[in-house]
Image: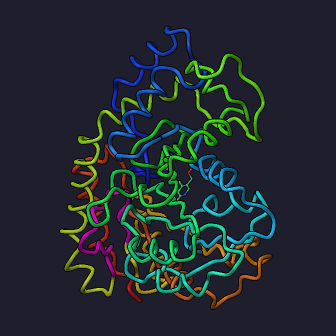
Amino acid sequence: MSPYRIPFNKPYLVGTELGYIEDSVRSGHISGDGDYTRKCHAFLEAALGAPKALLTTSCTHALEMAALILDIAPGDEVIVPSFTFVSTVNAFVLRGATPVFVDIRPDTLNLDEAALERAITPRTRAILPVHYAGVGCEMETIMRVADAHGIPVVEDNAHGLFGRYHGRNLGTFGVMATQSFHETKNFTCGEGGALIINDESWIERAEIIREKGTNRSRFFRGMVDKYTWVDTGSSYLPSDVLAAYLYVQLEQRDAIQTKRRWIWETYGQALGNWAEAHGVRLPVVPDGCEQTYHMFYLLLPSLSVRTALIDHLKSRGILAVFHYLPLHLSAMGMKYGGKAGDCPVTEDVSDRLLRLPFYNDLTEDDVSDVIQALHDFDGWG
Ligand SMILES: *Cc1c(COP(=O)(O)O)cnc(C)c1O
């Protein structure tokens, strides 16, 4: 049994997943690209206004596909925030790319667009912004700089599905974007992801790479009379059984986002004065950003206060967790020359950030308990 009465995350079940799963199993098509996969594709394409969405086995795999599609090769450089999940960059490092880490903005914790230009070299082959917590990066500046240098942008939109920046959907700025349906994300099927393709010239290559380097997708659409090996590739399509699970959640988009918004706003309203009194910074959502309510974090005054607060919450049966460790200071990051001081905001924030329990069926009582426990904390040092 977990010692936590209120865990950090709980995988979400709408309740009707088993019906769709049974339907999928009985349809006789449980491999990839069955009816439920097609429904998910159509849903994502319509919701985002993107020319193509392809379900993948994870966001990590969608990122790997992006690296393959862009022909990333040894010697290429990719620009990535140091404050992100390993997969954002590992998918490109797997193809031989060298990561170039940039720092984040102190307010949104997104890639610092002002640091972008000087990170670009003649070898830069991709820019990988991450919409942290589902709050959009400064995409106007990022796209202007990227376009001026002719460098493709791939948005890691794992947190940002259905978020918007200046009225435009996150995931539709770059040539491609990636989504995650891991159980820690707003919409889930356990493990899953999607590649969103905004530049139509990449669609056919993406379908081929996803289907083991064959033109099987064209074959199924009747566009070629047999399918064969035409390019490099791998197997990135999930079983239709997982797509059935996911489709239920996508259909519940509004209910899920409404609930998450309520959790986020309840934390935000209840903690405003408390935060101010104790020098705690709450999340910042700039004007023009419609966020996704993916997480609620606190930026505490110091590492020692964070450690004390984690222990205090644990004593109340509440699990709160920190987030990314700076990638440039990881064992791998240091092999690429990363050293302390390279990304000061990342290094500072990584020590002080604490995420509160946040999942779709967190109850009103749970949220009140967390808020009360925070108010009861007296270990400010
Ligand atoms: C969750 C996450 C991923 C990886 O998603 P998977 O679907 O687990 O591969 C990548 N990037 C970010 C920013 C994430 O939060």
Q: Nearer the viewer, residue 28 or 263?
A: 28
Magenta stretch encompasses residue 178: no
Q: Position of residue 351 (x, y in %)?
A: 53, 79
Magenta stretch encompasses residue 289: yes
Is 204 placed above or below 277 here?
Answer: above
Q: Nearer the viewer, residue 342 or 266?
A: 342
Q: Quadrant of the C terminus?
A: bottom left
Indicate the quadrant where residue 301 lies.
Answer: bottom left
Instruction: Give the residue displayed 40% in from the left and 78% down from the top.
Output: 299
Instruction: Give the residue displayed 41% in from the left and 19% down from the top.
Output: 20
Whether residue 308 can be seen here: no
| The residue stretch that appears in magenta | 281-297
Q: Position of residue 44 (x, y in %)?
A: 39, 40
Is 261 placed above or below 340 here?
Answer: above
Dominant SS type (magenta): loop
Instruction: Give the residue displayed 52% in from the left and 38% down from the top.
Output: 54
Indicate the quadrant where residue 329 lies.
Answer: bottom right
Is 207 placed above or below 86 here?
Answer: above
Whether residue 300 can be seen here: yes
Q: Position of residue 34 (x, y in %)?
A: 52, 21
Q: Position of residue 268 (x, y in %)?
A: 23, 68
Instruction: Give the residue displayed 60% in from the left and 39% down from the top.
Output: 204
Q: Nearer the viewer, residue 211 or 132?
A: 211
Left or right side of 269 for 247? right
Quadrant containing ligand 1: bottom right
